[in-house]
Amino acid sequence: MSSAPGQLNFVGSNVTQNLNKAFAYYQQMVENIGSDEDPQSNLRDVIGAARTSLERCLRGFDSFDALAFIRLAAGPWDFTDLRESDSQVESSQAAQDVVALTLMGMGLPRQPLTGANSGQPNPAEALGLAAQIVTAARTLALFQGRQANQPLGALAGEFVGYELSVRGRQYESIAREVNSELLGHPSVESVIKHVLGFTLDDIRAVREASTALMNERLFGARDRIGEATKAGAPADSEAFLRDINIMMNECRLFGAVAPADVATRSGVAETTARAVLDFFSTSRPAENDVNPVLRFVDGELPAPWGCIADEDEYLLLNGFLSEDELRRNLERGLIAAAAEKKNSAAKMWPKYDKRRAVYSESKAADLLGKMLHGAKPRWEGQKYIGPIDAADTPSLGKTADRTAVDTDKFESDILFLVDGVAICVEVKAASITEKSRSGNAQRLAKDLEKTLKEGSAQADRLTRLITTNGGAWSVEGKWIDLSSASEVHSIVVMLDDMGPLSLSMNVLADKGIIESAEVPWIVSMHDLMVLSRTLDHPAQFLEYLRRRRGRRLATMVNGVDELDMFMWFLDGGMYFNPDPQEIAKQLPLERPIKASDARRYEEQSRVRLGTLTDPLDAWFYWQEGLSRTQAAKPVRQEQPWVEQYLSSSEAAQTPGWLRFGADLVGLSESAQRNIGKNLRELRRAAQGGGIERSLTTHSAGSYGSWLLTISVAPKDASTEHLAEYMDAKQYQTHSDRSMLLLYQPDSSLLGTRYRGRPQERTIDRDYAVDIAPLRSLKMTFSNLPPSARRSTVRLRGSRGKKKRE
């Protein structure tokens, strides 16, 4: 859906619906607030009233029975029809958590087992009231963030609201991989075992055994009831009634486990099973404790959180020992043990912290290398000399006198240098502090500004050195030559899940905290892994990185999830018209900028991203065995001739394979299609004669101008003149780079020739090109370069074609 020009463009299947809901919610809140009433006070009143009603709804029922029944009613037990764009707060795990916290605030009431029909609370009413609390708490966090008197206060409030309301934030297979590699590492395993008394394998064994017991009891009862119903009458009426009771009344009989049963089923010692269950459980609060619901509203969810303990029973909550929360929970345990000086934990934490940093940097390097067709980093953990003042960067060149410059020693985590592209990577393994996560919007805003601004400065420092000087000095005084880099990018990789913080660099740029023309791409390890599994070509990754780092995008897009941004790119979006003045600077002739082009650039709509990940979710759920429906992997489909070039050049690693490949990926679908059409016409023409047939096209963008010459040559045709022509045309058009693609009439790609840098300007060369039989500059640039906006998307697989919004 699009708004009027220059205003707001809604991208996503649910964004308009959600905005309408939010508008209705705020409108009702305004109507209910007195002229002198504070909105935050009103929200707390709403929460108090909903909590009172929820307690009334739950009163008289056994806590474990009610929670197990509500979990059964709310699900989800299968992800086949689960779509994030259709999600409702009432059916969310967060709402189920609030019901559990409410029962804990009531003292965790319990009833004896009788086998009689005890009934259950109305799950729709209970979850509806819980959803009111979640929504009000999230809104309260937003208000508190906006009043934090910090540049990033609004972002901090949004993040706290995200923490309150979002569960299952990572794909299970990816979270499991990270946990296995980090928490399952022998050095980390020994730390966790020594301090907490169990290992990652123990946790997983307990989880699998507990859920297996729950499923056997629940679905066993269901199946037996179904078989009896089909038979017309139960063979054993007492067993039939017991099964009915398990499913409808005393649901703790399937929803709760005992350590002894878990130990028997899992094969771990009972003491170990109990240690795991105790660590991940919470229990009845003390009488003088703050009500758990009120603590939740203030950003404090009990942690670790996975089950509720009462005597020798452990009620399994939705998300029990989920992979995406394991690391954070174990880190909480290690930190708490260190604070209590328990089991030498204070000495153990640095050991874990060091391994976490080593792992994060190694994993980031592996993932980026995979997306760069197996490229190895130019360095990892390189120390170099950098300027204290960025203005002194030119004074640290290879031949400059650096003795008069104030410098310091800095470290670069990772640097890739591939096909003329340098990618500077900083990795942040440390977690966001619990104080920041737990509702202190002002503290979180300060932490974010400090951490992200520092990460930006670290990445920008090396980027400047490479761009300005073509290299850097090592701390040993040796010159590191990086002059082959014609294009430089910076990335900050965070081990933590980022949620709305994944777009935080956009906010930093929008608020003026980062003043550079471009911003680093900040991405979580999880999202980087998703990209590495999904993208088909390194050139597509580079084009995504180019667009992702553009300041125009950073200041024009608002959203909460990096993967929505990624899917927007796959669907052919994530594009803003370039500044016509910047394009004009790259053209070797003066031409007045049309008022319509300038107006179109200035009046581009801001974008609000909604949920775009439904196809990605469906593919992951199918891969992980969580859905019964096979789903195709989402892809960014290029035109056949572009796909051919990308695959061929990647396999041979021919010059230009990455950088020029990204140039082709960045073309609009119509531009790719038109070039492909012309290529087919050249092939037909070449079949009828003994001379080669060629076409040349030019484009310009944020990363320079480029020239493409496509030629089709019959077997006996001469092609020696093409290199000379290509060089002359590149010189004439002042292009930064040029590519020749040479085809045979049967459409096979015969070879390529790439020049990755602009040619040196000389008087003699100017004269030679002026008299050369070349098409004039005026005719060459009769039209602006094609845009990169696409209008349609194609998904491979049985789902066929889908229209883009």
Image (spheres, rainbow, N blue to C red):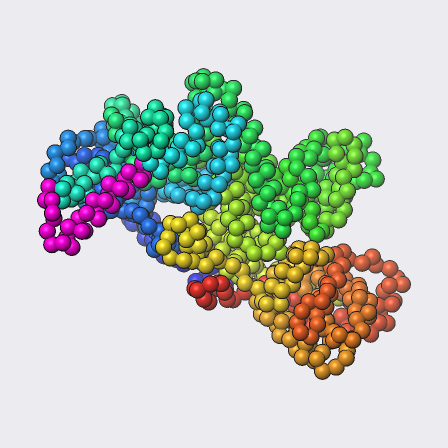
**Is residue 56 in view from this perspective?**
no
Answer left or right for 264 relative to 686: left
Q: Residue furthest front?
A: 235
- 229 magenta-colored: yes
Q: Residue at x 24, y 41 (%)?
A: 217
Q: Residue at x 35, y 40 (%)?
A: 319
| Residue range highlighted in magenta | 210-238
Magenta highlight on residue 179: no
Q: Looking at the image, is 778 positioned above or below residue 580?
A: below
Residue displayed at 41% across by 58% down: 630
Q: Residue at x 46, y 48 (%)?
A: 560
Please state the horizontal and vertical placement of residue 768, each as a whole percent of the image: 87, 67
Quadrant of the snapshot with the N terminus: bottom left
Q: Quadrant of residue 390?
A: top right
Give residue 498's position: percent from left, percent from top. Answer: 48, 41
Q: Quadrant of residue 207?
A: top left
Residue 425 locus on image (x, y percent): 62, 41
Q: Is residue 616 visible?
A: yes
Image spot of residue 623 (x, y percent): 44, 51
* Magenta stretch, main secondary structure class: helix
